[in-house]
Image (cartoon, helix red, strand yellow):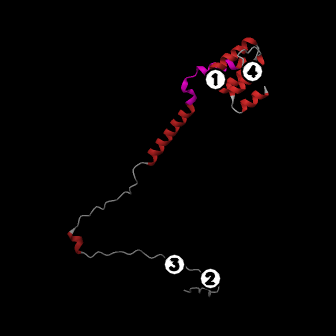
């Protein structure tokens, strides 16, 4: 059993199975049958594993793991063939949706600033003869504060 366990840990499922059964196909020992069923289940051969778990259940109707594994493997076998690829399919669809969203969000029309057109005003011949005066804006008042070392400001007298 220890040799079979070491082989199974290295991924050599068939060699581990041969080590447990000693090359014979007769599995009347419940312990050996349990070990082989667990190996075959770990290997991924669920059709063969289901037969082994059912055989173990017929030998020992109160075997807890066999009663749990038979419905679990039946459920696994009843799933559609594409069910194993569902995470990849869902990831691909999500990536496609995000990609389309980013494409449409970032590929909108280029920003073009609004250009205001100047509307020419009607020329009145009377206004053109009079000189136009341009009013300059009033300059901003400058406020200065005394600094250290400057003479004090004089007070105004009236």
- For the residues labelled 1 and 2, the Cα–Cα distance comes to 95 Å
- Identify which residue is drawn at 48% across, 42% down: 99
Q: Residue under label 1, please give it.
A: 45
Identify the element where label 2 is drawn: loop
Give the Cα distance between marks 3 and 1: 93 Å
Residue 80, placed above or below residue 11: above
Q: Is residue 71 magenta?
A: yes
Nearer the camera: disc 4 or disc 2: 4
CB atoms of marks 1 and 2 within 8 Å:
no
What is the x, y in percent for residue 79?
58, 22
Residues at circles 4 and 1 in contact by the CB criterion of under 8 Å: no
Tell me where the magenta segment starts and ends, as one range.
69-85
Query: What's the residue at 62%, 22% (across, down)?
Result: 76
Location of mark 4 (residue): 22
Position of the N terminus, as image quadrant, is top right
The mark nearer the N terminus, 1 or 2, is: 1
- Crowd band around label 1 with a 10 angstrom C-alpha radius: few (<14), some (14–19), many (20+): few
Is 46 magenta? The answer is: no
Mark 4–mark 3 Cα distance, whole angstroms, equals 107 Å
Furthest residue in direction left, as rendered = 125
Residue positioned 24% across, 75% down in the render: 130
Q: Nearer the viewer, mark 4 or mark 1?
A: 4
Q: Are marks 3 and 2 in contact (CB under 8 Å)?
A: no
């Amino acid at each position: 059993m220890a040799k079979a366990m070491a082989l199974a840990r290295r991924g050599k499922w068939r060699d581990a199975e041969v080590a447990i059964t000693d090359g014979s196909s007769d599995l009347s020992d419940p312990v050996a049958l349990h070990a082989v069923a667990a190996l075959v289940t770990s290997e991924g051969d669920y059709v063969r594993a289901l037969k082994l778990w059912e055989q173990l259940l017929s030998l020992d109707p109160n075997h807890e793991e066999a009663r749990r594994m038979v419905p679990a493997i039946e459920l696994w076998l009843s799933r559609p063939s594409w069910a194993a690829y569902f995470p990849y399919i869902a990831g691909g669809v999500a990536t496609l949706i995000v990609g389309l969203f980013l494409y449409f969000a970032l590929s909108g029309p280029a920003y073009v600033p609004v250009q205001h057109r100047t509307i020419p005003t009607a020329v009145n011949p009377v206004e053109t003869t009079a000189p136009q005066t341009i009013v300059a804006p009033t300059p901003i008042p400058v406020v200065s504060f005394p600094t250290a070392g400057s003479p004090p400001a004089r007070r105004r007298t009236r």
